[in-house]
Image: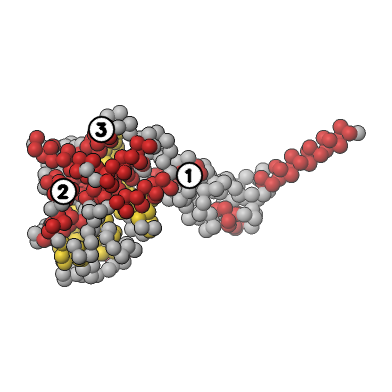
Amino acid sequence: MKVIVLLTLCVTLISQGYGNSLDSCQGRCGYGTNNNFSCQCNTSCERFRDCCSDYVEQCKGGATSCKGRCDERYNSQNKCHCNSKCDQHNNCCNDYTDLCGGDAGGGGGVITDADIKAVSEVLYALDSNKATASELIIDPQALVPNSQTSSQKDLSSRPLFRYVDGALLSRPTYAAFLAVLDNYFRMTGQTEHFSPQQVAEQETFIKEAMSNTELGRELFAFFYTKGVYASEEEFLHDLKMMWFGLYSRNNGKMDSSGFEHIFAGEIKGGKVSGFHNWIQFYLLEKRGKLNYYSHSFNGPWTTFPDVMGMQFKWDGYFKQVGSVVIGCSPEFDFALYSLCYITRPGKQCRLSLGGKQLIIQTYTWDKTTYGNGKKFIASAFPSSP
């Protein structure tokens, strides 16, 4: 009799445990209808009225966390997602990396979103060469909705930049940046050739930006403590390769690099490609080669650096949205993009600047590699809020 009672109790407990799992959508969002479950967790359950009691919380608008949702199937009704493909589609929940072990990029230990936000705040505080309100004055003028960014209408009669202090551009990192900026043919399909002097200018810029500034040394220290780089020499060499290594965007010609695409800008297919730097924008506008049309977003920062997405024409070639971190130093721009590319290659990278979120979207150049299969930078730019 005792044996029978004990068996009955075990069966009851197991049934209760099993039944509880069948009555929840935890980890089941988006799966097809399964009659082995007492309730369902897909869009059809709303029509047939057999959704689990926590369906809305777990699978719809309330599902903004990956808690209990790692590796779930795709459900179009979710605001964000928690499976291996969400990185590709840039729709992961904010805690996906922390809770589901998403790819942290780089090497060594896992670098979490919290780590990236913390170090980006430090870099933000250390940007001693950023422009002040007296050194840089802009005139944003027309603000257009996203639906009008392709209209190619000049809605701003004045230049974007009203004033830039010349002394700002003469500082060591700015001067080193400017020396590299004019070393490129803007048209894709034209092979780039670097003279020994131009190669030296690339190395000088990296040294000035990363070795000779507190901001750059802090970025290396972060990667060193995370086991991404074993020495500063390795770090600087990798930066040179990923940023200045050449690859082909057109007709097999070695015509492009991450630095050229992001900072100098290119022309491909009759349109401006890349071009995500405020200094290049200012220089071209000052020379009468760039016509500012409007902006489609402006960041929440009240001091520099700020973030803007602009519409403009460069010698007759249109850019629908050229987003830039405006008013920052060259080393800060270079550091932010490097941080995001090394830790989140080909993904969204969530930063924190002065307590406000900034998202940088990065892309890898998959067709060519260097070193031990590493990939060059294809693009990186601030994403609209």
Q: Residue at x 24, y 42 (%)?
A: 210
Q: Name the residue under label 3.
A: 233
Is residue 122 placed above or below 384 in the rendered structure?
A: above
State the separation of the CA atoms marked 2 and 3.
Answer: 21 Å
Q: Looking at the picture, tell me which residue is in the foreground, 105 or 177.
A: 177
On the question of residue 238 being in view, the answer is no
| Viewer-side label of 3, 1 | 3
**Residue at image point 32% right, 50% down:** 123
Sooner in the amino-acid sequence: mark 2 or mark 3: 2
Q: Toward the viewer: 22 or 374? A: 374
In depth, the one of 173 and 256 nearer the eye is: 173
Nearer the observer: mark 1 or 2; the answer is: 2
Q: Which residue carries the number 2 mark?
A: 172
Question: Quick check: 376 left or right of 12?
Answer: left
Indicate the quadrant containing the N terminus: top left, top right, bottom left or bottom right.
top right
Can residue 4 be seen?
Answer: yes
Rendered location of residue 42, percent (x, y): 57, 51
